[in-house]
Image (cartoon, rainbow, N blue to C red):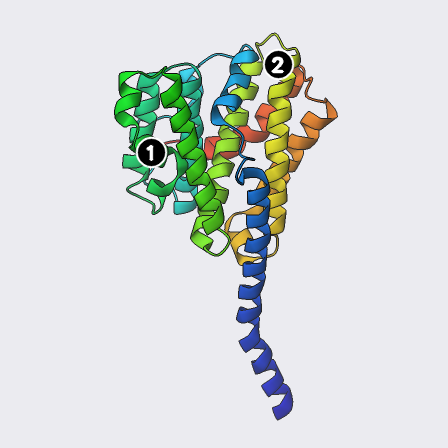
Amino acid sequence: MRTARLLVLALLAVAPVARAGDDAEAMRKASALWREVFGPGRQPSILARNELFKEAGLSYQGSLTVPLGGSYSCRSESQLRVLSGMLAFDASYAVMFGRRKEFFDTVQFLTSDIGQRVDGIDALPLPVAVRGLRKALAEDFSNEETLKSYADQGRKQLGILVEKAATDPLAMTMLMDYWYGWSVQGLYVASSLAQTAEGGDELARLFNRQMQNSQQLEKLYSALEGTQLGKRLSQPDRSSLFRAVSELIRSKQGAMGRKDFRTLLGLVQGPRSELVRPCTK
């Protein structure tokens, strides 16, 4: 009996170490996947992604962006990090269509309202990219060199976060939440606008890009499956969402009809609406 008790105690003592080791290994795998997608020379240009929206004949609709009025003070830190990714997409969406006021309003809300409630926001690609270019962007929002510098700074900072995420759980959590928010908001805007679009090859290219994003995210969440970090990120729900999105788009080879866009919208509308509803006082 005494031997059995000692064995149980030994196993209990080792379990946290084993879980920490599992988390560390999962983070290394996830970081390697991040580097495959966003490593040097592999990061998709923000401006190139933006052009897909314009080429597909989509437009700017402010009603589809995250509401900037009201308070999000009741949201958890994870939810606020997801919101930061959604707002970063909205800022990029504003850049696509030359909406300077909307861009700066979004950046201000992200860095002030959200940034005051959760650590690490100032290290995200959008705030870092804007920090040194605020004056230039304010003076000429359509200057190609300035926009290229903005995109390059964002990609550089994303690369720094990817490297840091290999060993820093907070950086990994920030990346996963941020990109989840970016992707959900991007899918929401694209599938909403696509219901009245003409369609064609350009729209198919846009949604094939969305499918690739979803597949990459599904792989990332799978790499963290069963770990404590994965559980904190609601890994099963997020992984199944992106699996459903990529399967739908792949089954149509990107050439989707209005019914498919409604289905896609339905997949992301629930997770999104839960986050964008301002808190009641």
- Residue 200: image quadrant is top right
Q: Nearer the viewer, residue 39 or 180?
A: 39
Residue 169 drawn at (x, y percent): 46, 54
Residue at 33% across, 29% down:
107
Closer to the camera, 139 or 68? Answer: 139
Circle 1 residue: 110
Q: Which residue is mark 2?
A: 202
Classify residue 80 as left or right of residue 265.
left
Residue at 51%, 48% (x, y): give it.
Answer: 233
Residue 237 visible somewhere in the drawing: no
The residue at the far top in this view is 198
10 Å neighbourhood of mark 2: few (<14), some, or many (≥20)? some
Q: Secondary structure at mark 1?
A: helix
**Which residue is more in the foreground, 113 or 169?**
169
Q: Is residue 108 above or below residue 1?
A: above
Say which quadrant the N terminus sits in. bottom right
Kind of residue at disc 1: Leu
For image coordinates 48% across by 56% down, the residue present is 167
Q: Residue 118 occupies which quadrant of the picture? A: top left
Name the side, left or right, on which 163 lies relative to 241: left
Identify the amino acid type marked 2: Glu
Contact between labelled residues 2 and 1, with CB atoms less than 8 Å apart: no
